[in-house]
Image (cartoon, rainbow, N blue to C red):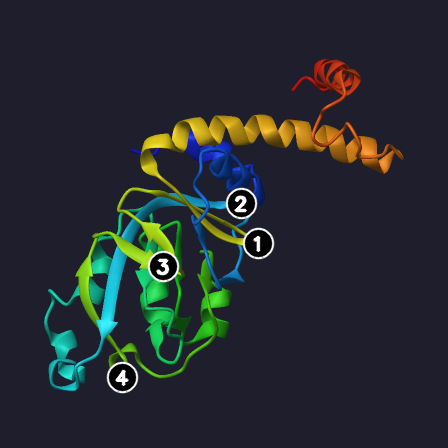
């Protein structure tokens, strides 16, 4: 369960910092590859627990337009069941030649209070989605309906998205650099560590802007820099 405290911490840190914190724990493949922001979150990073949708290659006889008459269709269920505050993550097999979703479904997710959506495929109606008050990340715009290539097969199961493993409930964070997946069981500690890292990085940036060299400063191998950081932190109230 993603706590309000952890969500707030993660909104204030970058995916770059989170990638470093995860790397220290041996987790190298948590960044969703080849996805780009179609629209960015306001006031911090996109953060939410993962709710997943899995596509497989479409089998034409099972994937006509009439499938949407079935209210249990996995894509439509995902849109209606993804909880408010969660992020809908779609495994589209890294194939943007057909859309993972479009403007109508994205608008429904926004109205329901979903925190964002991510696909390793593409979105149709991309200009429309870009204007929504909900961040979204995809590979590239794609006009054809998902039915031409993708068959929605299951929801809220473990998936791969852009080569990253995503389990339901994992914490998804997105910013201008992309989207990263934090295993749910370590989200609290990663968030706390990333906040500490961010404070130190803010100190480093200030020193570098003032003309200081990075040797011994970043990483802080010179004890004098750690003393200076402690003093800076007290003065900043951080």
**Residue 60 tag number:** none
Vertical placement of 12 versus 69: above or below? above
Q: Is residue 204 above or below residue 175?
A: above
Whole-angstrom CA distance, mark 2 to mark 3, is 16 Å
Within 10 angstroms of label 3, few (less than 14), some, or many (20 or more) residues? many
Q: Secondary structure at mark 4?
A: helix
In the depicted view, which residue is nearer to us: 76 or 30?
A: 30
Q: Is residue 5 visible?
A: no
Say which of 158 and 38 sits in front: 158
Give the foreground label among 1 and 3. Answer: 3
Give the residue at mark 4. Answer: 148
Which picture quadrant has residue 205?
top right
Distance of label 2 from label 4 (alpha carbons): 33 Å
Nearest to N terminus: mark 1 or mark 3: 3
Q: Which residue is mark 3?
A: 161
How far is the residue under mark 1 from the one under mark 2? 7 Å
Residue 9 lies, in percent from the top left, at 50, 31
Residue named by callout 1: 177
- Measure the C-alpha gap from mark 4 to mark 1: 30 Å
Q: Residue tagged by mark 2?
A: 15
Residue in the foreground of this view, choosing between 29 and 90: 29
For the point 46% across and 73% down, which residue is it? 126
Q: Residue at x 48, y 63 (%)?
A: 35
Under circle 1, the secondary element is: loop
Q: Please tell me whether residue 10 is drawn above or below residue 86 in the rendered image.
A: above
Residue 94 x %, y %: 38, 69
> Closer to the N terminus: mark 2 or mark 3?
2
First in sequence: mark 4 vs mark 3: 4
Of the image marks 1 and 2, the number of the one nearer the N terminus: 2
Residue density around tag 1, few if under 14, some if 14–19, many if 20 or more, within 10 Å: few
């Amino acid at each position: 369960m993603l706590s309000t405290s952890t969500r707030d911490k993660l909104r204030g840190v970058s995916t770059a910092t989170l990638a470093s914190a995860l790397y220290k724990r041996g987790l190298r493949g948590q960044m969703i590859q080849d996805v780009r922001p179609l629209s960015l979150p306001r006031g911090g990073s996109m953060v939410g627990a993962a709710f997943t949708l899995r596509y497989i290659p479409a089998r034409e006889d099972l994937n006509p337009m009439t499938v949407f008459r079935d209210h249990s269709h996995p894509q439509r269920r995902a849109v209606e069941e993804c909880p408010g505050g969660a992020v809908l993550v779609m495994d589209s097999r890294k194939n943007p030649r057909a859309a993972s979703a479009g403007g109508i479904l994205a608008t429904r997710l926004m109205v329901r209070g979903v925190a964002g959506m991510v696909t390793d495929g593409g979105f149709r109606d991309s200009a429309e989605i870009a204007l929504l008050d909900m961040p979204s990340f995809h590979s590239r715009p794609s006009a054809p309906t998902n039915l031409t290539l993708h068959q929605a097969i299951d929801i809220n199961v473990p998936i791969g998205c852009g080569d990253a493993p995503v389990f339901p409930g994992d914490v998804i964070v997105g910013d201008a650099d992309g989207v990263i997946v934090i295993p749910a069981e370590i989200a609290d500690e990663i968030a706390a560590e990333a906040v500490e890292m961010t404070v130190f990085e803010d100190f480093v940036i200030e020193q570098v802007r003032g003309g200081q060299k990075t040797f011994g400063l970043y990483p802080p191998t010179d004890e004098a820099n750690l003393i200076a950081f402690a003093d800076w932190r007290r003065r900043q109230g951080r």
